[in-house]
Image (spheres, rainbow, N blue to C red):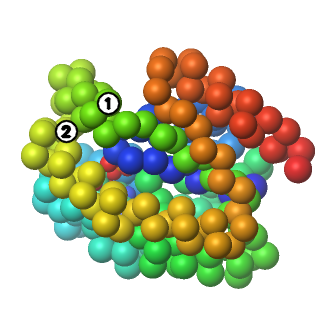
Amino acid sequence: MIGIIFGPPGSGKGTQAARLEKDLGIHHLSTGDILRGEVAKGTPLGKEVGRIMAAGDLVPDGLIVDVVRSRLPDAEQGVGALLDGFPRTVAQARALDSMLSDEGHRVNFIVALDVPEELLVDRLLHRAQVEGRTDDTREVIAERMREYHKLTEAVLDHYRKQGVRIHEVDGTGSPDEVFDRIHAAISGISSR
Ligand code: ADP
């Protein structure tokens, strides 16, 4: 099973994906976490992407597609993989589709978190104080939102056209409330 947790920066993808991993046993694969790990370790990849991430821009498609290609086979084992932060462009979505179709797989479901933009900015500024992520400043947040609207939103249309089930979920409220909504939206999915 391949799922995507989708939504703008600050919509709670990582928080909810971690819960879904616990609940469904689906493997959470976060490209943001992977890249931050590479930056922290100072690997060649980390050195290449650090400055791009700090500016709130997207790293090149080819680079992130290679990262996912190397991690997906492990993540797909067992229940399957829940992708968080990928695909973020239509080109990445096409690359994912062809990776999956090589093995007779496809994207089975998408959970799209819906949160008003003012609330997203508040949450990200709050996270800056708690976690100290360097890309959670007002200016960088604005750039990440622009990238989201310019490049990432179209990914949803790409999958809508393919007839993939898109579960739009209200992402406002507490993490527990959002999780309950997701749970209700996708209940029974693992037996489908
Ligand atoms: P958020 O969803 O809050 O912006 P992420 O942790 O998903 O945070 O991503 C942080 C940064 O990592 C992005 O702003 C971008 O620079 C980089 N990144 C993560 N995933 C991708 C991707 N699929 N394509 C390009 N860049 C990515």
For numbered disc 2, what is the local secondary structure?
Answer: loop
Q: Is 170 placed above or below 191 here?
A: above
Residue farthest right in this picture: 191
Specify the quadrant that holds the N terminus.
Answer: bottom right
Q: Is residue 68 visible?
A: no
179 or 129, which lies in front?
179
- Within the displayed image, which quadrant is ligand 1 positioned in? bottom left
Numbered badge on residue 119: 1
Q: Residues within 10 Å of mark 2 (few under 14, many from 20)?
A: many
Q: Marks 1/2: CA distance?
A: 14 Å
Q: Is 169 placed above or below 125 here?
A: below
Pointer 1 with pointer 2, Cβ within 8 A: no
Q: Position of residue 26 (x, y in %)?
A: 68, 43
Q: Position of residue 136 (x, y in %)?
A: 19, 38
Numbered badge on residue 136: 2
- The amino acid marked with disc number 2 is Asp
Q: Quadrant of residue 23?
A: top right
For numbered disc 1, what is the local secondary structure?
Answer: helix
Q: Position of residue 45 (x, y in %)?
A: 27, 65
Residue at 55% from the left image edge and 67% from the top image edge: 157
Q: Is residue 90 visible?
A: yes
